[in-house]
């Protein structure tokens, strides 16, 4: 039996155990996935605990994605660029850090045939999820990235393709894709949208990292205006699949992603 889990501060509503249980079943892996709620004052003991208990891998969520980087032996390129780790692989006692949110975002765009190369992209929010999105956009050759914050911030100063603006400046921005990385519109405040319908009209495609509800108010406004829309459930499944690929040191057929995604859609409806 192999042991895995999710590390965070408060985890009662996580879908991760259900997703990874499905992956274990699909791949015929004898594994268990548990929730590890750790108080902030104890997070420094994580690396010792993983080694002592021979836990093969863990995902990491709020508020520890940056903190855990201090306790790892190696960190992948994309995780370094993003400045956050959400997956740890205990490889024979050596702790390796990765960011699979990057790959989950990749999966969700590919699923809807949304391309960003040479496109003008607007990203709402500057938190941890935004960092993974921006890293992917830069790698994939986005032409221009408008990063939207409530206040002006000095971010990505050495990247000419990124311009940080406020929400008040969005009225004058037109682009190809707009991406919501904020929690605005998440359950239970499902009637909220991070931007108005007038802003949404200025884009061809809308992407929302939120997966509960499946169709946020932001996406509903996009559908109303005949835009291409993409919700966050595929990203959730995709980042979990990528974590398993790291832990199992093997590739996983895309059919597994789609099967799990379809089962979760039924659960939410």
Image (spheres, rainbow, N blue to C red):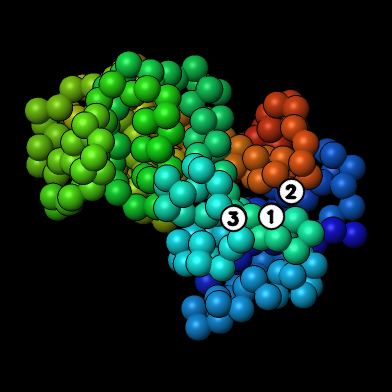
Q: Which mark is residue 73?
A: none
Res 81 visible: yes
Element at badge 3? strand
Q: Residue at 18% x, 50% y: name it.
A: 154
109 over 57 or under it: above or below: above
Q: Earlier in the sequence, mark 1 or mark 2?
A: 1
Left or right, 44 with reference to 219: right
**Could you tell whether 105 is left or right of 267 in the image?**
left
Outermost residue, bottom direction? 41
- 251 or 258: which is nearer to us? 251
Location of mark 2 (residue): 247
Mark 1 = which residue?
89
Q: Determine the residue positioned at 29% across, 46% down.
A: 125
Q: Nearer the viewer, mark 2 or mark 3?
A: 3
Disc 1 and disc 2 in contact, CB within 8 angstroms? yes
The answer to whether mark 3 and mark 1 are in CB contact below 8 A is no
Circle nearer the viewer, 3 or 1? 3
In this view, 60 is above or below 191: below
Mark pair 2, 3: CA separation: 15 Å
Q: How far is mark 1 from mark 2, CA to CA?
A: 6 Å
Pointer 3 or 1: first along the chain:
3
Q: CA distance from mark 3 to mark 1?
A: 10 Å
Tell me the SS state at disc 2.
helix
Q: Position of residue 257 (x, y in %)?
A: 69, 32
């Amino acid at each position: 039996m192999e042991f895995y889990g999710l590390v965070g501060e408060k985890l009662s509503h996580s879908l991760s155990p259900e997703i990874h249980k499905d992956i274990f079943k699909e791949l015929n892996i004898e594994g268990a996935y548990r929730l590890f709620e750790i108080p902030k004052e104890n997070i420094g003991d994580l690396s010792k605990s993983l080694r002592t208990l021979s836990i093969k891998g863990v995902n990491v969520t709020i508020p520890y994605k940056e903190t855990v980087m201090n306790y790892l032996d190696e960190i992948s390129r994309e995780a370094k660029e993003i400045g956050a780790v959400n997956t740890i692989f205990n490889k024979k006692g050596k702790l390796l850090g990765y960011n699979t949110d990057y790959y989950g975002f990749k999966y969700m765009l590919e699923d809807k045939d949304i391309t960003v190369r040479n496109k003008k992209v607007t990203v709402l929010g500057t938190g941890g999820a935004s960092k993974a999105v921006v890293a992917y956009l830069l790698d994939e050759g986005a032409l221009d990235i408008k990063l939207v914050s409530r206040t002006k911030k000095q971010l990505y100063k050495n990247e000419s393709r990124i311009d940080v603006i406020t929400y008040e400046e969005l009225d004058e921005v037109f682009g190809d894709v707009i991406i919501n990385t904020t929690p605005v519109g998440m359950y239970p405040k499902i009637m909220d949208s991070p931007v108005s319908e007038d802003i949404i009209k200025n884009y061809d495609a809308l992407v929302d990292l939120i997966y509960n509800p499946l169709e946020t108010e932001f996406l509903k406004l996009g559908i109303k205006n005949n835009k291409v829309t993409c919700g966050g459930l595929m990203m959730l499944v995709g980042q979990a699949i990528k974590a398993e690929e790291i832990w199992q040191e093997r590739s996983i057929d895309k059919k597994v992603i789609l099967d799990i995604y379809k089962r979760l859609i039924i659960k939410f409806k």
